[in-house]
Amino acid sequence: MIQERGYLDMQLLRFSTAGSVDDGKSTLIGRLLYDSKSIFEDQLEAVEAASKSRGNEEVNLALLTDGLRAEREQGITIDVAYRYFATPKRKFIIADTPGHIQYTRNMVTGASTADLSIILVDARHGVLEQTVRHSYISSLLGIPHIVVAVNKMDLVDFSEEVFNNIVVSYKDMAQALHIRNITFIPISAKDGDNVVNRSENMPWYTGAPLLEFLETVPVGKDVSNVHTEGQGAFRFPVQYVIRPISSRFPDFRGYAGRVASGVVRVGDRIKVLPSGLESEVTHITQAADELTEAYPPESVTIQLSDDIDISRGDVIVRADEPQPHQEQELTVDVCWFNENPLQIRSKYIVRQTTNETLGIVRTINFRRNINTLEKESGVTQLNMNDIAEITVHTAQPLTFDDYRQNKVTGSVIFIDPDTNETVGAGMIKTE
């Protein structure tokens, strides 16, 4: 059965929350879940009981996301807490990330797949160093939409002047980081002002409440316009080669994987990298269905007109589109995850899409002070939670794009060859 589709289901929004300690990240997420009626009665009962045991007169909605015992005891968020909820308009995956600097790696992990980042600012304190740090990480990860939620407006008498001053201050900082697509929303997470429902206490704010904005912010585009909208050239990292498995299909050979970007159609002329061999797409299948075209993030099997040598880790691209880079020398913005420091001349397994090879750290070009954003040169090692630009030389050439152009083919992880631990994650830079 051949299926034709004009659109993919793009109604899933992944977003992360970030902010300074006690800015109300977990309370905001709890308020979203509570006011959108996305929690079960037993969950609410458990939170009510936990709130009473802590001496809270009101329900502490932060406990809906601060799931670890250590988090509840300390009153802070340590690990990334993922929550799922839905409204009639959209599905959501929330990553509630830590605000402490020592948990930077957790924030990077939680925000790495986000379409949008909510950065909370305490209306009483304004833009702080932590705000700059969280904004920088969101910018580094290429998150396309930033919402600055100015929280605790109830504690500044819902002042429009206070809100406007924070907007001006944040825009000045964002300009230096080249952050675009910023939306500012004044809220009170504790009381629910402008979270799900419009606040009567701030009639001067004429924008949408937070949930309405989350339901309507553009996520994905009409996939039939994938090229004209600039969503990138076709990239298909091969995950598995399907060879003949029975006498019924003695000539079957397919290449399975997930479409990373772009679109591919039956009849397209393609090129296989790194070999450079060309062929034509004859069939695209997904389970028992035969398709005429495939889009990200679909997992499909592609068949070609020519029997050419293709292995796991190869990348199939369209021959008529811009080609990815193929190099052994990589410049990478890396966040170091491990207690054992990264040192110059250290060797790691470098995994990129479905490919992996051995790599050696040539240089640490600079470490970024993620509070002041200053570049620190002369660094010889990176400690856990450090962010830096490094140069890595790989044993085999990798096929990649700049991370800002393609998050899938532009990202790498570093694995300790002795322990098999993931010790760092990086974003490849080509400019």
Image (spheres, helix red, strand yellow):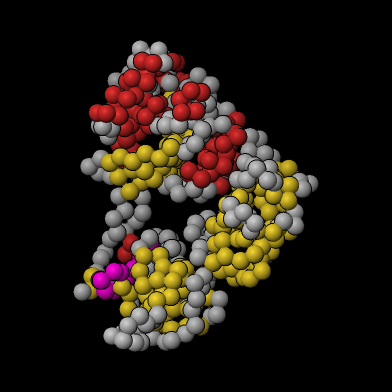
- Give the left or right position of residue 113, taking residue 358 as reference: left
The answer to which image quadrant residue 152 occupies is top left
Measuring from the top left, give residue 12's x and y in whole percent: 33, 48
Q: Is residue 203 left or right of residue 372?
A: left
Does residue 295 belong to the magenta stretch?
yes
Q: Nearer the viewer, residue 97 or 183?
A: 97
Residue 317, horizontal then vertical, whole percent: 46, 73
Magenta range: 286-296
Count the labels in the image: 0
Q: Residue at x 37, y 82 (%)?
A: 244
Q: Where is the N terminus found, in terms of image quarters?
A: bottom left
Please give the name of the residue rendered at 57% of the width and 65% of the height, measured from the top-left corner: 356
- Residue nearest the viewer, comparing 423 with 279: 423
In this rendering, the answer to whether 12 lies above or below 160 is below
What is the quadrant of the C terminus in the image? Answer: bottom right
Evaluate whether residue 32 shows in this view. yes
- Quarter assignment of residue 369: top right
- Specify whether residue 165 is in view: no
Q: Is residue 385 left or right of residue 404?
A: right
Q: Residue at x 76, y 46 (%)?
A: 379
Residue reaching furthest to the right = 378
Residue 181, image x, y percentages: 45, 43
Say if 273 sits above or below 384 in the image. Answer: below
Magenta segment includes 305: no
Residue at horizontal 36%, vertical 43%?
A: 93
Q: Position of residue 103 (x, y in %)?
A: 57, 36
The answer to which of 150 and 307 lies nearer the viewer is: 307
